[in-house]
Amino acid sequence: MNTAVNANVVHESEAQRQHARVKIPAKLRFFGPDRTPVDARVLDLSAGGLAFNAGQMPLKIGEVYKARLQFVIDNLGLAMDVELQIRSFDRPTGRVGCQFQNLESQDISTLRHLITSHLSGDIVSMGEVLATLQRDNFTKARKVKDGGHGMTPFGRLRAVTFSFAIFLVGLAAFGFIFKSVYGMYFVSHAQAGIVSVPGMNITMPRDGTVQSLIKDDGIAAKGAPLATFSTSMLDVLKGHLDEDQLQPAKVEELFGKQMTGTLTSPCDCTVAQQLVANGQYASKGDVIFTLVPRNSEANIDARFTYRQFADVRPGAPVTFEIAGEDKIRTGKIVSSTSLKSADLSSDIRVQIKPDEPLSSTFAGRPVEVNSDRGPNLNWLIDKAMAAGI
């Protein structure tokens, strides 16, 4: 057996025409370069174009001309307007080969029906042509699944990067929604919170003015002077004067005299707040300074609504964040009291002890407190039963 392969042999499917070319009785009214109509006989016709005899008409290859293709079916004329692009022109014989341009779907269906019927030897009737025009003879193109083989490496990288970016955006949106829903149903937020430290108040011993002696660091050792005060001698001796000393002249003299004194720190403390400004008049018993003992541990005071009663019981764990810090701290509720015991709808004040010692330097800072109860099946069942589900 001869198994040699002839490289010059070409299969007919590689060289066959794109469209079958047939000779159908048809006429062509061709509009030449000067737009003058010329009637010509169609030499052959296919679904992609036609050939006709143009004589000595000056035509250019590649130019597009308008024409009207005419058929006779059941003694009735059928005409369609077409655009022809000159693909070949044999000047000695006048034969012109043309290709259809911008054919409409109805024209394509009509041409294919006429050519198919002619090839099969059937007689074409006007009813068949009308039936062909009424139905949809086209379908959507089949998708080509090349698995990305037609893409360049840069195109693949760009597609993967874009898909990954969309995935990250979707993941971030899902995380945001999940966090919002979780915070709405499983986290109780305090209405307000502050760092509190057990302190003591320094009050004004007599009516008079105050002048602070506190250093810039606000630290006062035990016995150190905090401020000086000035008061009228008359106020000091009030209740200790007899009738002779209450004469107008004596009273005026005593009123003009001033007595000064010093306020001292009772402990190693830090001045948390000065409530009376320098040179301002203060009455006896008014609080001048609020002191916080040094190296003392601070607690958290927070306020919750009465609807959150079950979430802020003593012993419940909480998380809190102090203003000016990015650290999330933890603690436990040690006490829970109502701000107004006679009002059942009032807020609840809780005291929180941090798990880690909290410096007293944070005294007075606002705090955000959250009580995270987490997804609890029993809690969900109680909520459903309360809603009557």
Image (spheres, rainbow, N blue to C red):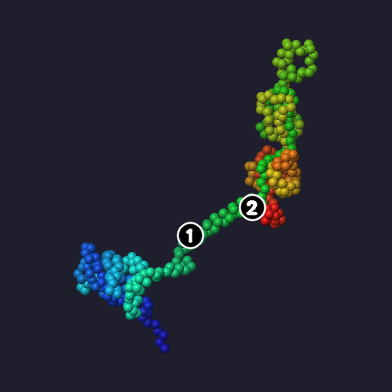
> How many residues crowd around disc 2 within 10 Å: few (fewer than 14), some, or many (20 or more)?
some
Numbered disc in front, either 2 or 1: 2
Quadrant that contains the N terminus: bottom left
Q: Amino acid at mark 1?
A: Arg
> Mark 2 vs mark 1: which is more N-terminal?
1
Q: Position of residue 152 (x, y in %)?
A: 45, 64
In what element is the residue under mark 1? helix
Amino acid under label 2?
Answer: Tyr
Q: Residue at x 29, y 70 (%)?
A: 78
Residue at image location 71% in from the left, 56% down from the top = 378
For disc 1, the neighbor class at 10 Å (few under 14, some 14 to 19, many from 20) is few
Q: Which mark is residue 182?
A: 2
Position of residue 202 measured from the top left corner of the image (x, y, whole percent): 73, 30
Mark 1 = which residue? 158
Vertical position of residue 379 compared to residue 105: above or below: above
- The residue nearer to you, when weighing 329 against 73, is 73
- For the residues labelled 2 and 1, the Cα–Cα distance comes to 36 Å
Q: Nearer the viewer, residue 46 or 165?
A: 46
Quadrant placement of the C terminus: bottom right
Residue 99 lies in quadrant: bottom left
Instruction: Please name whichever residue, 289 or 137, is drawn nearer the observer in this view of the structure.
Output: 137
| Residue 136 seen anywhere in this rendered image of the structure | yes
Residue displayed at 70% across by 33% down: 271
**Which residue is painted at 66% across and 43% down in the image?**
191
Relative side of 305 to 124, left or right: right
Residue 330: x, y in percent? 70, 48
Residue 25 left/right relative to 358: left
Residue 15 image point, x, y percent: 35, 77
- Residue 21 vertical position relative to residue 275 in the rendered view, above or below: below
Confirm or deny contact between disc 2 and disc 1 (CB under 8 A): no
